[in-house]
């Protein structure tokens, strides 16, 4: 169980820098991984994590929105997690998504992380758990296109809730002996109120990094530093789940999976039970690699056979 002290509690800090206010959200290590189902109140992982005390501003106006948004966060050995509550006075008037290409125009939460110079990761989730993202090419190349992240949402009576999992593997950075600090912002669009709101006050568009706040991940316990650091060297379970989902939908891979009934059965059992995605990630990854390596080995043997037919005979 994570122990919080005044020094490690989540903080809202205002610093003066050239007359502008820089907000800092602090998060720290947890040995409990949230279950991503959007139901924050019943999850023991969130039970003792306080909400970020800094409220949201209307976009480009230092006024409070009519629909409040609040969030909290924690991190585990391999990922950063956010829990977000979006108060909504007119739940029945939220617009359904008719055009996924204009996802940002509907009720949505947007998270921004600047992980390097000219490297802005933009993630979005809506009240139905639908997601969209904008991932820079440099991130895709760095991760070998293993850019998985995960989210879930839940609609309540007068609010909707979201949980988001952002792997350190995707960010390319993790806290170690020193705290990790990233330019960060969290924004929201409420269609019934016709409101755009933002945690870090924005004078420009939501992706204006000059007005971002800061996410500060405090160092993990000394005995966990190596485990957290190691997460940067391997794809996260969310990428593995995404990879298997793509394989299931690809006719070429479907025929391959039929040739590995025992392995596919293992993958299916884990895939069908979301709480197992993180708990059984090692088994899932090992099983998936066994299938992919077998296919690669078969392809290599075929290439050798074809070369012999063409050039040795």
Image (cartoon, rainbow, N blue to C red):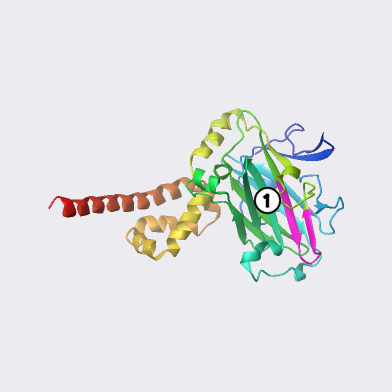
Q: Residue at x 77, y 33 (%)?
A: 6
Residue 176 at least partly seen: yes
Q: Check if residue 265 falls in the magenta segment.
A: no
* Spot occupied by residue 225 in the image (x, y as percentages of width and height): 57, 31
* Spot occupied by residue 70 in the image (x, y as percentages of width and height): 77, 51
Give 260 or 94, whichever is nearer the viewer.
94
Q: Check if residue 190 falls in the magenta segment.
A: yes
- Vertical side of 170 occupied by 133: above or below: below
Q: Residue at x 60, y 31 (%)?
A: 176
Give 106 or 38, whichever is nearer the viewer.
106
Most extreme residue toward the right is: 63
Locate residue 10: give its quadrant. Answer: top right
Mark 1: few, some, or many residues within 10 Å (few <14, many ≥20)?
some
Q: Residue at x 65, y 45 (%)?
A: 113
Q: Is residue 201 left or right of residue 272?
A: right
- Main SS of the magenta part reads strand
Locate residue 58: give its quadrant. Answer: bottom right
Q: Secondary structure at mark 1?
A: strand
Locate residue 191: give its quadrant. Answer: bottom right
Most extreme residue toward the left is: 313
For mark 1, what is the residue?
A: 111
- Vertical side of 221 occupied by 311: above or below: below
* Spot occupied by residue 279 in the image (x, y as percentages of width and height): 52, 47
Q: Residue at x 78, y 55 (%)?
A: 197
* Spot occupied by residue 45 in the image (x, y as percentages of width and height): 66, 46
Residue 37 at least partly seen: no
Give 4 or 173, whichever is nearer the viewer.
173
Q: Which residues are magenta?
A: 185-197
Quarter in which the N terminus is drawn: top right
Q: How many marks?
A: 1
């Amino acid at each position: 169980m994570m122990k919080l002290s005044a020094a490690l509690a989540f903080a809202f800090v205002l610093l003066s820098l050239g007359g502008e206010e820089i907000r800092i959200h602090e998060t720290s290590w947890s040995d409990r991984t949230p279950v991503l189902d959007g139901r924050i109140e019943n999850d023991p992982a969130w039970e003792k994590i306080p909400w970020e005390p800094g409220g949201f501003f209307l976009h480009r106006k230092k006024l409070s929105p009519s629909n409040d948004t609040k969030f909290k966060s924690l991190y585990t050995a391999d990922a950063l997690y956010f829990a977000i509550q979006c108060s909504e006075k007119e739940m029945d008037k939220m617009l359904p998504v008719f055009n996924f290409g204009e996802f940002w125009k509907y009720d949505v939460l947007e998270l921004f992380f600047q992980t390097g110079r000219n490297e802005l990761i933009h993630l979005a989730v809506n009240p139905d758990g639908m997601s969209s993202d904008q991932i820079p090419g440099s991130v895709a190349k760095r991760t070998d296109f293993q850019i998985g992240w995960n989210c879930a949402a839940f609609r309540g009576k007068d609010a909707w809730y979201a949980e988001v999992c952002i792997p350190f593997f995707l960010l390319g950075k993790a806290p170690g002996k020193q705290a990790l600090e990233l330019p960060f912002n969290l924004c929201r669009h409420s269609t019934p109120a016709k409101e755009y709101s933002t945690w870090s006050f924005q004078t420009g568009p939501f992706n204006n990094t000059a007005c971002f706040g800061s996410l500060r991940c405090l160092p993990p316990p000394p005995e966990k530093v190596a485990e957290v650091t190691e997460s940067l060297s391997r794809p996260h379970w969310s990428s593995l789940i995404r990879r298997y989902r793509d394989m299931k939908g690809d006719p070429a891979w479907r025929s391959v999976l039929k040739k590995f009934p025992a392995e596919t059965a293992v993958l299916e059992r884990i895939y069908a039970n979301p709480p197992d995605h993180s708990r059984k990630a090692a088994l899932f990854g090992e099983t998936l690699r066994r299938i992919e390596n077998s296919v690669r080995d078969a392809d290599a043997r075929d290439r050798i056979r074809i070369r012999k037919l063409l050039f040795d005979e």
